[in-house]
Image: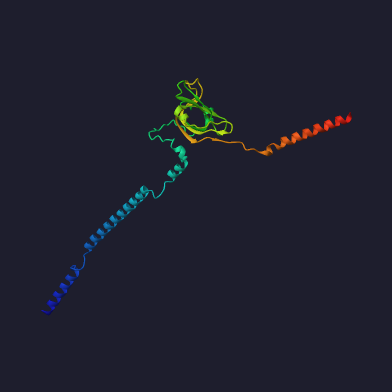
Amino acid sequence: EGDAGEESGQAEGADGADAPGDGEPSPQDEDTEGAGNTGDAADGAAEGASGEAGGGSTQGEGGIEADPVRSLSADILELDPELAEDNRVNPQQLPDSSFIYDTSIADLSTADAYIDGQTVQVVGEAIGDNLRATFGGRQRWITLSSSDDSSTIAVIMSAESASRIDTFGAYNVRGTIVQVRGIFHLVCAEHEGVSDLHAEVVNIVEKGVRTEDPFALESFLPGAAAVAVGLLMMGLFYFLRERRR
């Protein structure tokens, strides 16, 4: 009986060691709990990434970081406050593949048939006079001169646009700097076959100024010296002639 009780106690101890107790988790429960922790970590990382992306977009919308391209454009397009009121932006301007940017007046003066009928944009000084292009006076004939050379282009514009030109270039006068965008005609059928530019948009870049030549006394010194030498020679010649008598 003692031996049988001892063997029965050993069997119960072995069963207790193999079977999981109430306070200890099983391996299956540990795997399930680890998978749950991994899923929670993945969800947390996704939420963190979403938060960073949202913060970045908010920062961009709030304007904390300035756009260098926009700032540069604002600096380039900055106009005189007195001129900004007369210059208007056309938000309804449609894209045009034939638009040629920053065409010079010199290029138009030597243009070929490729530019004929194209929309171009030039900047030049208004010179000469404000002439009537039609009998009714609704259109005006303005001449623009290039600042680089003596090239000129005839511009046909409305009387309202021409009235904004306050000064025309002449001696001691620098005319108003005008930016014109319009259609270039190599041989205009409406104006006796001349090469001209029919303006669609006219902007005043800079107002004209009048200048006075400063008086420089040193510029008269060579002439005064020459006159003095001439008078001296004439007096010497007169003295020698009287002495021979």
> For the point 73% across and 35% down, which residue is it?
224
Q: Which sits in the foreground, 235 or 75?
A: 235
Instruction: Give the position of the C terminus as an image quadrant.
Output: top right
Quadrant housing residue 136: top left
Quadrant housing residue 39: bottom left
Q: Is residue 75 above or below residue 156?
A: below
Q: Position of residue 36 (x, y in %)?
A: 25, 58
Any part of residue 205 in sight: yes
**How is the rendered protein coloured?**
rainbow
Any part of residue 110 in sight: no
Farthest bottom residue?
A: 2
Q: Which sits in the foreground, 66 or 39?
A: 66
Q: Is residue 101 above or below residue 57?
A: above
Q: Which sits in the foreground, 88 or 39?
A: 88
Question: In the image, is 47 to the left or to the right of 223?
Answer: left
Q: Which sits in the foreground, 102 or 222?
A: 222
> For the point 24% across and 61% down, which residue is it?
33
Farthest right residue?
A: 245
Q: Position of residue 155 (x, y in %)?
A: 49, 27
> For the point 74% across and 36% down, which residue is it?
225
